[in-house]
Amino acid sequence: MEKFSIRDIENLCGIKAHTIRVWEQRYGISIPKRKSGNHRFYNSEDLKNLLRISFLYNNGYKISSIAKLDSREIDQLVNNTVINQENFPSFISRLIEASVDFDESRFLKLTDKLLRKVGFETGIKDLFYPFLQKMGLLWLSNHVIPAQEHFSSNLIRQKIIAATDRLPVPDFYLKRVLIFSFPGEYHEIPLLVAGYHFKKNKQSVSFFGTHVSKDAVSEYCRYRPVDYFYTHVITNIAAEKINSYTDFICNRYPTKKLVISGPATCCLKKQYPNLVILQSYDEMVKFTQSI
């Protein structure tokens, strides 16, 4: 059984711990279990219930009214809530709930509904990325098993690939971009998103995916000209490996640009004339538009 502290619930639902305690005392909402040392905890059913309640609460429903509803009535209200960008955080809660349950149908219906309403690019930036960050928090705190994170990530991955395939093929390409991640880095979604934006802006994209060796890059460059190397680094690999691979690319291909994004760019120790560091999603998008 999964166990969550009240701080976990606060982080995942966006409701202050003090508020949750008040709801429990006043309305009997999601009374926690107790460990032998009298420490309170919540299970996965409590989490799902509080995710639904916080969703309605964040969309303007009074907690006193929600407390009077049974689970069927709560589900009906949740499913009938209108989507807009202001209530994205509460829709993220619904995606988490579907992921915890491995409910592919519910996950896909919700994402399809959201993407039809706000568009693919807004959905990626304001919905999928924050959702994946929250799922990562659950995984790091051992509250979801790897299968649950892989389940949701793969469904999002399919959406990105489908959207990229729907982009028109340009009559000519401006630049050639090789997209890959360093050995030991397995986060593919940021690479796919970058590939979408490069292709949208008429760049020729060669996508190598994750965990790519120096030899594979060198072999490709023997046969195909490359204008830009693009990679994204998060936290999976040691700083010395990031710097070693960066040094290899920048020195071996001094006339080409190496573009690196992601939180682990803070590990980079040297600057190179042909190194471009992107600090945010917006910077990545602007870069794909500028080359």
Image: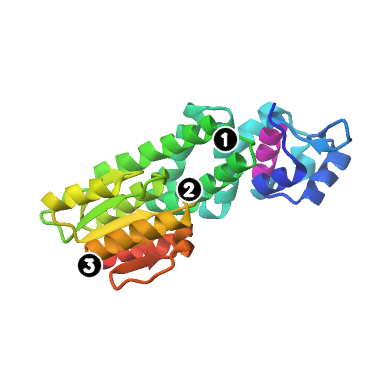
Q: Horizontal and vertical percent for residue 95?
A: 54, 38
Left or right of residue 24, residue 173 in this image? left
Q: Is residue 152 above or below residue 1?
A: below
User: Which residue shows up at 48% across the image and 58% down it?
Assistant: 263
Q: Secondary structure at mark 3?
A: loop
Q: In the rendering, which numbered label is found on residue 79? A: 1
Instruction: Mark 1 or mark 2: name the one nearer the start of the chain.
Output: 1
Say which quarter of the image contains residue 100.
top right
Front residue of 137 and 91? 137
Quarter of the image with the C terminus in it = bottom left
Question: As shown in the figure, which amino acid type bears the numbered disc 1?
Answer: Asn
Q: Would you say residue 21 is visible in this rendering? A: yes
Front residue of 48 and 291? 291
Q: What segment carries the magenta color?
A: 46-56
Mark closer to the observer (1, 2): 2
Do tag 3 and tag 2 residues touch (Cβ < 8 Å)? no
Question: As shown in the figure, which amino acid type bears the numbered disc 3?
Answer: Pro
Question: As shown in the figure, which amino acid type bears the numbered disc 2?
Answer: Asn
Quarter of the image with the N terminus in it = top right
Instruction: Mark 3 or mark 2: name the one nearer the start of the chain.
Output: 2
Instruction: Mark 1 or mark 3: name the one nearer the start of the chain.
Output: 1
Label 2 neighbour load within 10 Å: few <14, some 14-19, many 20+: few
Q: In the rendering, which numbered label is found on residue 233? A: none
Say which quarter of the image contains residue 145.
top right
> What residue sits right under mark 3 in the picture?
254
User: Which residue shows up at 41% across the image and 56% down it?
Assistant: 242
User: Which residue shows up at 62% across the image and 32% down it?
Assistant: 76
